[in-house]
Image (spheres, rainbow, N blue to C red):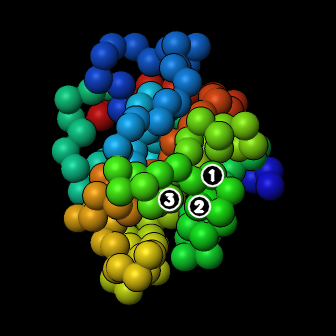
């Protein structure tokens, strides 16, 4: 479904942001999180930056505010969303259970994957996921589909932005 996200923040740690140099996302064997793609988080304001920068220091790079255009976005908010992801875009972990997302396949149908802030709230069915008769915690289970995702974030497979502005902090 085409939707438009709110303004996004990206921290470039390697100099000037060049959206044309974004590398295609790649699955990593035995890891839930992919390699490459383009990571952002919802922009709050110049002082705070984003939900991510509220929790993690991000002073070691240049901040960029991006205004997204409409894009095909898979939004994760509920356990049903994870069921849909794993039913259509799963790959096996090192125990051969299908708990990891096949990001390369997901890029065939979507421009981005957006994990909402509510996924990290206490009691969220995404944070504490029941899968294969186990409760998987997003922060400490190697088998959770979003293991190593620490807060609200967006993984772009294709850059879909109307504008990009450097922010002076």
Drawn side of residue 51 relative to residue 4, left or right: left
Q: Residue 152, can we see it?
A: no
Whether label 1 touches label 2, CB < 8 Å: yes
C-alpha gap between disc 1 and disc 2:
5 Å
Where 113 sits versus 131, above or below?
above
Q: Nearer the viewer, residue 51 or 127?
A: 127
Residue 89 got which mark? 1
Secondary structure of residue under mark 3: loop
Name the residue located 22 percent from the left edge and 50 percent from the top edge: 56
Depth check, front residue: 143 or 1: 143
Label 1 CA crowd tier, 10 Å (few <14, some 14–19, many 20+) = some
Quadrant housing the N terminus: bottom right
Residue at (65, 44) in percent of width and height: 106
Neighbor class of circle 2 (other Cα within 10 Å; few <14, some 14-19, many 20+) is: some
Is there a contact, CB below 8 Å, between mark 3 and mark 2? yes
Mark 3 against mark 1, which lies toward the viewer? 3
Number of the front mark, 3 or 2? 3
Q: CA distance from mark 3 to mark 1?
A: 9 Å
Point out residue 2 in the picture as x, y percentages from the top left corner.
80, 50
| Numbered label attached to residue 86 | 2
């Amino acid at each position: 479904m085409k939707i438009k996200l709110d303004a996004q923040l990206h921290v470039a740690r390697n100099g000037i942001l060049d959206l044309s140099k974004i590398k295609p996302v790649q699955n990593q064997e035995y890891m839930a999180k992919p390699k490459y793609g383009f990571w952002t988080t919802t922009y709050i304001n110049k002082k705070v930056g984003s939900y991510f920068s509220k929790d993690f220091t991000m002073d070691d790079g240049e901040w960029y505010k991006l205004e997204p255009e409409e894009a095909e976005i898979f939004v994760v908010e509920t356990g049903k969303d994870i069921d849909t992801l794993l039913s259509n875009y799963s790959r096996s972990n090192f125990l051969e259970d299908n708990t990891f997302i096949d990001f390369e396949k997901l890029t065939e149908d979507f421009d981005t994957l957006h994990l909402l802030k509510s996924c990290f709230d206490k009691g969220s069915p995404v944070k504490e996921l029941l899968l294969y008769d186990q409760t998987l915690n997003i922060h400490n289970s190697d088998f959770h589909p979003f293991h190593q995702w620490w807060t609200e974030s967006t993984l772009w497979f294709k850059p879909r932005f109307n504008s990009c502005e450097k922010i002076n902090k």
